[in-house]
Amino acid sequence: MLVALAAMLGLSELAVAHSFFDGFIAALCYAFAIFAVDTFVIDWIFFARVKRWRLPGTEQMDKEYAQKWFHVKDCFPMVPVFLIAAALNGLLVMLIG
């Protein structure tokens, strides 16, 4: 969490965020981008279609990997974590900027 927060803070500084709101929105955008790449690219394309990318022992689970909405629903419990990280990022941007 600290590494992700440091990365978000660094990217927020590069984006010239100066207020809590700027840092909060920037961190939410970064979290959404990470979620989108993980879900739509890695889970839906690579794991579902390329068997050598799958976890060892799950290479034959084509039906399970084809359940696309499972990966989206599985991220909903992470929303509070994203919001807390975004709020911390906003506070740090406000304190540093």
Image: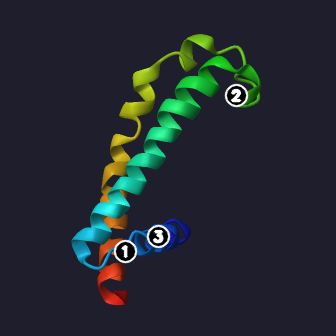
Residue at the extreme left: 21
**Disc 2 residue crowd, few under 14, some 14–19, many 20+, Cα 10 Å:** some
Distance Cα–Cα, label 1 vs label 3? 16 Å
In front: mark 1 or mark 3? 1
Front in this rendered view, residue 19 or 53: 19
Residue at the extreme top: 63
Q: Residue at x 34, y 80 (%)?
A: 93
The residue that mark 2 highlights is 54
Discs 1, 2 touching: Cβ within 8 Å: no
Element marked by disc 3: helix
Residue 27: quarter of image: bottom left
In front: mark 3 or mark 2? 3
Residue 75: quarter of image: top left
Numbered badge on residue 5: 3
In x, y percent, where is residue 2?
52, 72
What amino acid type is highlighted by mark number 2?
Arg
What amino acid type is highlighted by mark number 3?
Leu
